[in-house]
Image (spheres, helix red, strand yellow):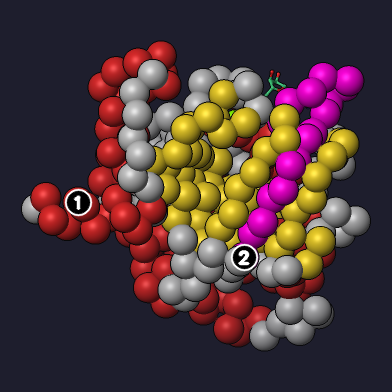
């Protein structure tokens, strides 16, 4: 198991956001998390990343078999957890290049080959069809919504994580950019097939490119329904209320087998 979340409860400002949350992800699996605004999706992602604002009041998070409760965010990144944030932060006065170099050097425990760094960064900006000048600008300052999202994927590809959490990576991306970002994620997974991905999204479109094993719907701080990608289609068509009231018993590999038989 790459990620094992057991009975996790999380509070912020005396408000309970996650309620006895359970999730297990094996290497190489892709899980989608959908759910209404305010249901706790970003809270989950920030808690996995170790954001100190979110207080864990119960339960545990194991990453690669290790309890990460007392581990700080930068150390979690070093272990191989990566979060592409829903609203990437601006860092005035720090160039994107310096930021990436620092992050990579922490990841590699101080070791960094500058020539390889420059070469790799340039290759990734090409893959993402990003303007090369973005490397020299302050992190996300004045970046458009879509440019910020691509910048998160640039970080991801440089840091080579084992668990990727994409919090609404698809929001703000135009049609071509969404395809490019999805292709980059798929290419990365082809290179590192053991990488697990959590895709948090409101829209089914990204799943046309990236095929998940499971789709979970959460509401009120817990997962209330799990299915395969058809659950996302159902949700798009009928909305949350209808979807909660229908049954979909097949999940994961069984559902994929059934789909193959259908085709
Ligand atoms: N730092 C914070 N301070 C106060 N309340 C917070 C904070 N972070 C989250 N919350 C509250 O926790 C609840 C869950 O928020 P969260 O951002 O996890 O929702 P979400 O499922 O990601 O929603 P969306 O789909 O709109 O992104 C919301 O009611 C939100 O206001
Ligand atoms: Mg959110």
Q: Residue at x 90, y 56 (%)?
A: 70
Residue 116: image x %, image y %?
58, 83
Nearest the camera: 44 or 95?
44
Q: Residues within 10 Å of mark 2 (few under 14, many from 20)?
A: some
Ligand number 1: quarter of image: top right
Image check: 165 left or right of 182? right
Q: Is residue 239 visible?
A: no
Instruction: Judge whether 12 appears above or below 241 on screen.
Output: below
Residue 79 image offset from top left, x and y in percent: 73, 69
Q: Is residue 120 above or below residue 147?
A: below
Q: 184 left or right of 25?
A: left
* Residue occupying the far top of the picture: 241
Residue under label 2, please give it. Answer: 2
> At x 72% / y 35%, what residue is drawn?
20
Q: Quadrant of residue 43?
A: top right
What secondary structure prevails in the magenta region? Answer: strand
* Residue 35 seen by the camera: yes
Q: Is residue 227 magenta?
A: no
| Residue under pointer 1 | 259
Of 86 and 26, nearer the camera is 26
Disc 1 crowd, CA 10 A, few/some/many (<14, 14-19, 20+): few
SS at circle 2: loop
Find the distance from the CA under tag 2 to the CA under tag 1: 26 Å
At a point 11% along the width and 50% down the height, the residue shown is 262
Q: Answer with the quarter of the image where residue 97 lies.
A: bottom right
Q: Residue at x 31, y 55 (%)?
A: 254
Tell me the magenta residue range: 2-18
Q: Quadrant of the N terminus?
A: bottom right
Which secondary structure, mark 1?
helix
């Amino acid at each position: 198991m790459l990620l094992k979340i057991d009975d996790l409860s999380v509070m912020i400002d005396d408000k309970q956001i996650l309620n006895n949350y359970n999730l297990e992800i094996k290497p190489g699996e892709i899980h989608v998390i959908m759910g209404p605004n305010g249901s706790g999706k970003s809270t989950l992602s920030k808690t996995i990343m170790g954001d100190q604002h979110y207080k864990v009041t119960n339960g545990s998070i194991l990453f690669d078999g290790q309890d990460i409760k007392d581990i700080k965010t930068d150390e979690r990144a070093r272990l191989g957890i990566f979060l592409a944030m829903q609203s990437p932060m601006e860092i005035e006065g720090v160039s994107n290049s310096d930021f990436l170099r620092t992050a990579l050097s922490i990841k590699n425990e101080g070791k960094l080959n500058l020539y390889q760094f420059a070469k790799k960064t340039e290759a990734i900006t090409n893959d993402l069809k990003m303007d090369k000048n973005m490397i020299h600008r302050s992190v996300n300052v004045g970046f458009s919504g879509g440019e910020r999202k691509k910048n998160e994927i640039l970080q991801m590809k440089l840091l080579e994580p084992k668990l990727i959490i994409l919090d609404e990576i698809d929001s703000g991306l135009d049609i071509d950019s969404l395809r490019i970002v999805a292709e980059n994620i798929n290419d990365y997974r082809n290179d590192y097939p053991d990488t697990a991905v959590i895709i948090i999204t409101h829209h089914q479109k990204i799943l046309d490119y990236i095929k998940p094993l499971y789709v979970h719907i959460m509401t009120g701080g817990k997962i209330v329904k799990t299915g395969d990608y058809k659950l996302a289609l159902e949700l798009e068509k009928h909305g949350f209320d209808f979807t909660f009231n229908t049954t979909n018993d097949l999940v994961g590999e069984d559902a994929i087998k059934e789909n193959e038989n259908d085709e």
